[in-house]
Image (tube, grey):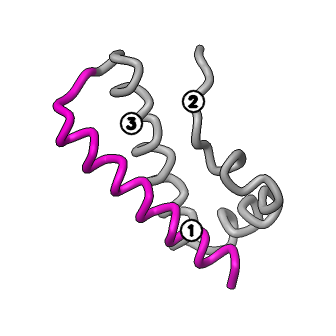
Amino acid sequence: MSHTPHELSEEFPDKVEKMHELKGSNAHFAKLADEYHEVNRAVHRAETNVEPMEDLAEGELRKKRAMLKDQIWAILSA
C-alpha cells in the first residue's frame, strides 16, 4: 500500500508517545484522532484518484482535516 501523507505521527513526531497515552485515557482525543485518520485517508484517496471527487468536496475534506488537526494540537500542547 502506498504511503499516506499527513499522518498524525508525521505531523507531530515529538508527540507520538503523548498521543498514544491520550488515545487510551481521553475519549475525546481518541475520537478526534480516529476522525482525523478517516478524513486524512479520504483526502489521500481523492488526491490519488483512487476515489475521485469534486474539487469542492475535496476542499471541504481538507478544511475538516485542518480543523481536526488544530483541535488535536490544542490538546497536545495544553
Residue at figure coordinates x 27%, y 45% from the top left: 59
Depicted 56 relative to depicted 15: above or below: above
Look at the image and say whether residue 41 sits in the magenta stretch.
Answer: no
Residue 13 location, x and y as percent? 78, 53
Depicted 58 relative to depicted 30: above or below: above
Q: Which is nearer the eye, 53 or 20?
A: 53
C-alpha span from label 2 to label 1: 19 Å
First in sequence: mark 3 vs mark 2: 2
Specify the segment rendered in magenta. Answer: 52-78
In the rendered structure, are the residues bearing label 2 and label 1 in contact, judged by CB atoms less than 8 Å apart?
Answer: no
In what quadrant of the picture does the N terminus appear?
top right
Q: Which is nearer the eye, 28 or 72?
A: 72
User: Circle 2 sits on which residue?
Assistant: 4
User: Circle 1 sits on which residue?
Assistant: 72
Residue at figure coordinates x 35%, y 57% from the top left: 64
Quarter occupied by residue 51? top left
Label 3 neighbour load within 10 Å: few <14, some 14-19, many 20+: many
Kindly report the secondary structure that dominates the magenta region of the rendered protein.
Answer: helix
As drawn, which residue projects farthest toward the bottom?
78
User: Circle 3 sits on which residue?
Assistant: 43
| Kind of residue indicated by mark 2 | Thr
Q: Secondary structure at mark 2?
A: loop
| Kind of residue indicated by mark 1 | Ile
Q: Is residue 42 left or right of residue 18?
A: left
Label 1 neighbour load within 10 Å: few <14, some 14-19, many 20+: many
First in sequence: mark 3 vs mark 1: 3
